[in-house]
Image (spheres, rainbow, N blue to C red):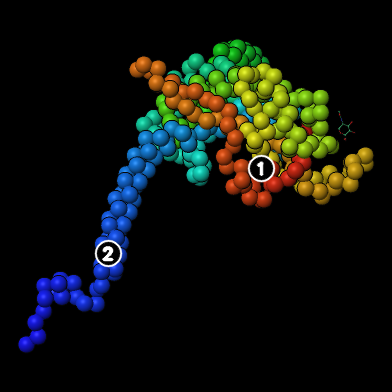
């Protein structure tokens, strides 16, 4: 019967002193690394959970050029040749994520009272470009056939009185028409905004006022002209200069993005045009500006501060995407179409 020493039992002969120490060393190392990983994960989770939603939220204010918007689309006639930049809307996004759309919000439905302070401002800066529905009802009185002379008199007086009483009614009609536009924007993008509905519309008005872009002539070089091409790089630089003159903030060309509309020129009887028939025309449709959102705690009132930032998603635009103007370097800024 072979005898074993205690040393042989707990540490078989195959384990010499060196491998035993190595075993303990690795075991200790694993435990240490394990704790490190757990602590790092806890730290990351706490850090991300606390800061990410605030830091990465950003806004995109979009202004539209009605002349381009109204190509191949039903528009109220007065916007077809309006040379003025108008508000298009405000998107709320999270950096590195897909554009947010149709989110769940505690105020999912549009409430007209949330634009009560902005309504008049928006009526000129953010109108509904769609044709007014009531333009169709104007025909009604003239279509009424009349049998006798007395009834003719009667119907004309009726139509006059109805047109005079309609004047005060016209305003709410316009409001209703515009509200459709604002409601659409709220449902699509506003519901993704981190705040109340009234604050969303207030933010749009404030950003539009602070960084007003209205004039067609952005600089001596950047003026609407359908037959000329403008470089998007130059446009971005010009816009940065344009806003730096008006505002304290430092704008640079990475803080703008553009959306274009692609149309194919079918204009065949244009003699002085330099062989543009059948050509693809990239027309500037939107100018977008990006803002970082910072929430400051002023006592018990949370206040949002908007700071111009680089547009995060620029690089993700594909060649065939209208965002970033289909990857074009130069586009047209049309004066008429
Ligand atoms: C528009 O651009 C064309 C081509 O560059 C130029 O000949 C024309 O003078 C421009 N029109 C205006 C009003 O600047």
x and y, in percent, of residue 36 in the image: 33, 49
x and y, in percent, of residue 270 in the image: 89, 41
x and y, in percent, of residue 291 in the image: 55, 30
Mark number for residue 324? 1
Res 276 seen here: yes
Give yes or no for contact between labels 1 and 2 (Cβ–Cβ under 8 Å): no
The residue positioned 61% from the left and 46% from the top of the image is 315
Disc 1 residue: CB within 8 Å of ligand 1? no
Q: Nearer the viewer, residue 266 or 313?
A: 313
Name the element at disc 2: helix
User: Quadrant where the C terminus lies?
Assistant: top right
What residue sits right under mark 2 in the picture?
Answer: 21
Q: Nearer the viewer, residue 256 or 157?
A: 256
208 sits to left or right of 186: right
Disc 2 residue: CB within 8 Å of ligand 1? no
Picture quadrant of residue 252: top right
54 sits to left or right of 141: left
- Estimate the spatial distance between the alpha carbons at disc 1 and disc 2, rounded to whole Å: 62 Å
User: Quadrant where the N terminus lies?
Assistant: bottom left
The residue positioned 29% from the left and 69% from the top of the image is 19
Q: Is residue 325 above or below residue 242?
A: below
Res 124 seen here: no
Q: Is residue 130 above or below residue 171?
A: below
Name the element at disc 1: loop
The residue positioned 48% from the left and 17% from the top of the image is 116
Q: Is residue 145 above or below residue 169?
A: below
Q: Nearer the viewer, mark 1 or mark 2?
A: 2
Mark number for residue 277? none
Give the mark, 1 or 2, whose residue is nearer the N terminus: 2
x and y, in percent, of residue 98 in the image: 51, 45
The residue positioned 48% from the left and 39% from the top of the image is 94
């Amino acid at each position: 019967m072979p005898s074993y020493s205690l040393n042989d039992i707990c540490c078989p002969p195959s384990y010499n002193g060196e491998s035993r120490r190595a075993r303990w060393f690795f075991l200790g190392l694993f435990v240490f690394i394990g704790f490190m990983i757990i602590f790092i994960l806890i730290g990351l989770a706490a850090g991300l959970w606390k800061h990410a939603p605030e830091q990465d939220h950003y806004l995109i204010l979009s202004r539209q050029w009605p002349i381009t918007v109204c190509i191949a689309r039903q528009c109220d006639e007065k916007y077809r040749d309006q040379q003025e930049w108008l508000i298009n809307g405000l998107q709320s996004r999270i950096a590195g994520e897909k554009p947010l759309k149709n989110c769940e919000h505690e105020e999912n439905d549009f409430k007209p009272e949330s634009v009560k302070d902005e309504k008049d401002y928006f009526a000129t800066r953010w109108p509904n470009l769609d044709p007014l529905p009531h333009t169709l009802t104007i025909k009604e009185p003239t279509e009424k056939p009349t049998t006798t002379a007395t009834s003719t008199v009667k119907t004309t007086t009726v139509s006059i009185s109805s047109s005079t009483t309609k004047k005060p009614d016209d305003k709410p009609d316009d409001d209703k028409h515009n509200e459709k536009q604002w409601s659409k924007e709220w449902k699509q993008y506003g519901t993704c905004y981190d705040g109340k509905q009234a604050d969303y519309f207030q933010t749009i008005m404030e950003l539009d006022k602070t960084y007003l872009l209205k004039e067609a002539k952005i600089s001596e070089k950047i003026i609407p002209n359908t037959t000329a091409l403008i470089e998007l790089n130059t446009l971005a630089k010009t816009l940065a200069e344009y806003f730096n003159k008006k505002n304290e903030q430092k704008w640079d060309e990475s803080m703008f993005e553009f959306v274009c509309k692609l149309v194919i020129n079918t204009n065949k009887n244009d003699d002085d045009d330099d062989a543009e028939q059948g050509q693809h025309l990239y027309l500037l449709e939107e100018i977008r500006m990006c803002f970082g959102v910072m929430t400051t705690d002023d006592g018990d009132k949370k206040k949002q501060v908007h700071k111009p930032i680089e547009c995060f998603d620029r690089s993700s635009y594909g060649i065939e995407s209208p965002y970033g103007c289909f990857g074009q370097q130069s586009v047209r800024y049309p004066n008429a179409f």
